[in-house]
Image (cartoon, rainbow, N blue to C red):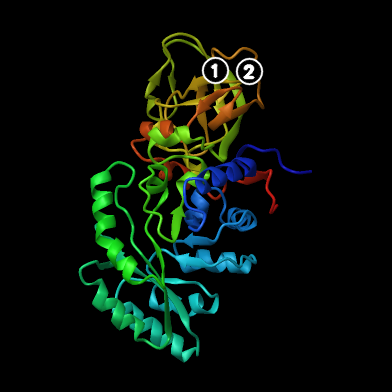
Amino acid sequence: MSSPRRCWVEVDGRALRRNFKILRGLIPRTTQIMAVVKANAYGHGLVTMAQEFEAIGTDWLGVANVAEGVALRKAGVTLPILLLSVTLPEEMEDAIRHKLTLTLSSYDEAETLDRIARVMKRKVEVHFKIDTGMGRLGCWHLKAKEELIRIRSLPGLLVKGLYTHFASADDNAELTRKQWRSVAPFFAKNADLLCHAANSPAVTRRYGFHADLVRLGLSLYGIAPNPADQGIGLQPVLTWKSRVTLLHDVSRGRTVSYGATYRVPSTQRHAVVAMGYGDGYFRLHSNASHMLVRGIRCPIRGRVTMDQIILDVTKVPGCRVGDEVVALGIQRGEKIQTRELALQAHTIPWEILTNIGARVPRFYKNFRSV
């Protein structure tokens, strides 16, 4: 007999395909799409999401590191995969063996990779990254021309792409346009390479900086990086659920959970829910956030603990043990949105999603690849 669900995530392939279609419609048909699946596909599940993206016609996948790329290759994913972070020298052999495309920011990295590639008698495909204002990876754009010439001279490497990354495309149009002006001439002079710059906010904000490929992350999962763009019709792909495990009445004056941070002002009906910060639900949501029970927003009382959370279900008629609880998503028309949880925890939607823990099982519905 299978175990009952206590704390789990549901991922909807129909919503994913809808988002893909909407975003595809915002860019030229000739522009390719990279689906970014790093950090367990933003909490949605690395392998299953990558397989679904491959099934629906995505051109590239983006990952953070070699381990993610290797996991996809072992699962049978054949799409081109770009490593978006630095590859350590001791990881390069594995990356080459699994035909991953590496990001290079400097000649020093390139020289190391070239040496390893020649020992393995392989040619390695790479993308050269240009720093136009992010200040993280990449060669500073004023020095990029000379550095690229040196890198392209190395016999073990095949430079196939050029790219940059926008620092504030969601809320700083001036900086974004400045970054584009810094890189666009360089792209034009290297038209034989796959050039890319636009991320999710650059696409949903409609800057038009599409080049040959766009890298889409958060938007594919149904959340516009800038809330003003949610009106384009994106639909969240993920719903996070749990269950009521215990109900009890708590009289006036009693305190609730660790630290006794909540004192009951009058008799309340409380429900214990089978999730906590051990599952990735932030402790910062203590006494601040809500969950849905029977479509009713129920406040969290007291501190979020590792495995359990206490909800005030006084206003939920007929609440029972076993009732489904929605921590993130829609229930009977009422919503708890990722951005709401992010604001309450003083963070961003990306962190809410990627923080959902490994012990939380993912269940997939309406997927072509499952």
Q: Residue at x 40, y 52 (%)?
A: 199
Q: Residue at x 59, y 68 (%)?
A: 73
Image quadrant of residue 155? bottom left
Confirm or deny contact between disc 1 and disc 2 (CB under 8 A): yes
Q: Can residue 351 be seen in this view?
A: yes
Q: In this rendering, is residue 302 above or below 207?
A: above
Residue 87 screen position, x and y as percent? 40, 71
Number of other residues with Cα within 10 Å of mark 2, as a class: few under 14, some 14 to 19, many 20 or more: some
- The furthest residue to the left: 142
Residue 326 screen position, x and y as percent? 57, 30
Q: Say what secondary structure mark 1 lies in.
A: loop
In-front residue for pair 97/153: 153
The residue that disc 2 covers is 319
The residue that disc 1 covers is 313
Residue 158 screen position, x and y as percent? 43, 80
Which residue type carries mark 2?
A: Cys
The answer to whether 307 appears left or right of 151 in the picture is right
The answer to whether 201 appears left or right of 233 in the picture is left
Q: Residue 224 carries which label?
A: none
